[in-house]
Amino acid sequence: MGSVERKKRFPALLVPLVLALLFLERFTVIYGLNYTNYRQVSSLRLKRIQRHLDKINKPAVMTIESSDGDIIDCVHKRKQPALDHPLLKNHKIQRVPSEMPRVKVMNKAEEGKDPNKTMSNEAVKGAWQIWHRNGTRCPKGTVPIRRSTVHDVLRAKSLFDFGKKQRSLSLARRSDAPDVVSGNGHEHAIAYTGTSQELYGAKATINVWDPSIQLVNEFSLSQIWVLSGSFDGSDLNSIEAGWQVSPELYGDSRPRLFTYWTSDSYQATGCYNLLCAGFVQSNSRIAIGAAISPVSSNAGNQYDITILIWKDPKLGNWWMGFSDNTLVGYWPAELFTHLADHATMVEWGGEVVNSRANGQHTSTQMGSGHFAEDGFGKASYFRNLEIVDSDNSLSSAQAISILAENTNCYNIKSSYNNEWGTYFYYGGPGKNPQCP
């Protein structure tokens, strides 16, 4: 549809009235999910929402309408939301990292070997983003930001909750997988490192699917976690990136590239994507929060994305690379306490929200919706799991553990070969005869 001019806003005095009329008992159905049944919204609440949106939706140099309904604003890089953070008032944007992680050379005898022919990379293709389809790009010196709407905020529990991960007030954690929070409706199938290492980053190639979501406030994601801090306290630092399907956050059921960060165990700091100040974007081609396309199909073509997160050895910022090491941006070191130094654990895998509607397990799928044992072309995978060590070198993640809370609902199986390095299949359908 090409680029369009930003539409003029209603006069400020008319906004609350117009929006109040718009959202009176408004009922929307998308992808078979009932997204919102709005009761009367007060003009005061709408004013608060609009003020918040004015803060995060920065003035655009150019605006792009995506075929999937997203509005992508091309914002001057020095006007992006990140720099509103009080800790970043004097932050100088780092244009590029001081160096990329170095890849340790493989043994020549191992190169090209493929002990598992069903996993040939010839059948795997990279996934990209839907908003690129019309050929329009953001100008140099700008960054693409997915515009947030009043609809997006009203799907959240509250304005405070908008863009945040919902975590239990009780941070009772399993000792064998510290980021897994028990008893709050989140279920996982993950691989993870031990806590005795000093880690400076992680990498993996992640299979992309479009799992079905039962309820609007549930989600399914596949991501990397880079963690440090006390896992049983309120100072856990986490950097996260991958893909997710979240009807509540995005208003649809498409898989989307996302980022997340927190420095206080998901209590008050941090958010998804660019929905608060923090993450500094440097790339004019990647829109965080935008839909990924194409996606994998059962017994058909497989599509995946590669995520790399690593700590700049000189300035200490945590950079993110996407697919062919395209630099997306970074989390400034100023945002963190423990991660200002190094990470102590990395996790890779899937997570879903199980709200147990009607007392039954959710049918929200993880990954492809297939269990790990179904293998390539059916089950979802992470491949080439790597970690970044203290000398900024990438190496295969060898000593990993795996965990799934309820293997009748979602499971995980890991292995190793020369082509995919350390890898695992994971996922599941959720509710089934063995998972009531």
Image (tube, grey):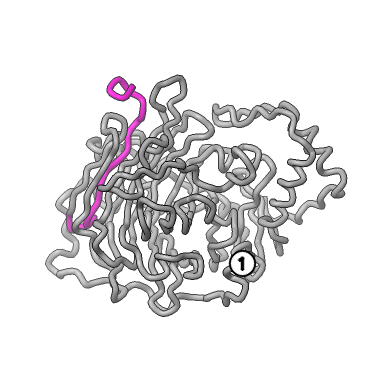
Identify the element where label 1 is drawn.
helix
Taking 228 as reference, is 167 above or below it? Answer: above
Residue that label 1 marks: 86
Taking 89 as reference, is 38 above or below it? Answer: above
From the viewer's perspective, is 130 left or right of 235? right
Magenta residue span: 417-436
From the top left corner, tell me how far across and down residue 56 is, in percent: 66, 56
Which residue is pictured at 22% across the width and 55% down the height? 422
- For residue 204, say whether it is visible: yes
Say which of 284 and 353 sits in front.
Answer: 353
Other residues around mark 1 within 10 Å, as few (<14) / some (14–19) / many (≥20): few
From the top left corner, tell me how far across and down residue 260 is, in percent: 48, 54
From the viewer's perspective, is 418 left or right of 200? left
Say which of 136 and 400 sits in front.
Answer: 400
Outermost residue, left direction? 109
Which residue is pictured at 47% across the width and 59% down the height? 263
- Give the quadrant of residue 185: top left
From the top left corner, tell me how far across and down residue 400 is, in percent: 22, 54
From the viewer's perspective, is 139 left or right of 99? right
User: Magenta segment, principal secondary structure?
Assistant: loop
Which residue is pictured at 87% across the width and 49% down the height? 11
Q: Is residue 423 magenta?
A: yes
Q: Is residue 2 magenta?
A: no
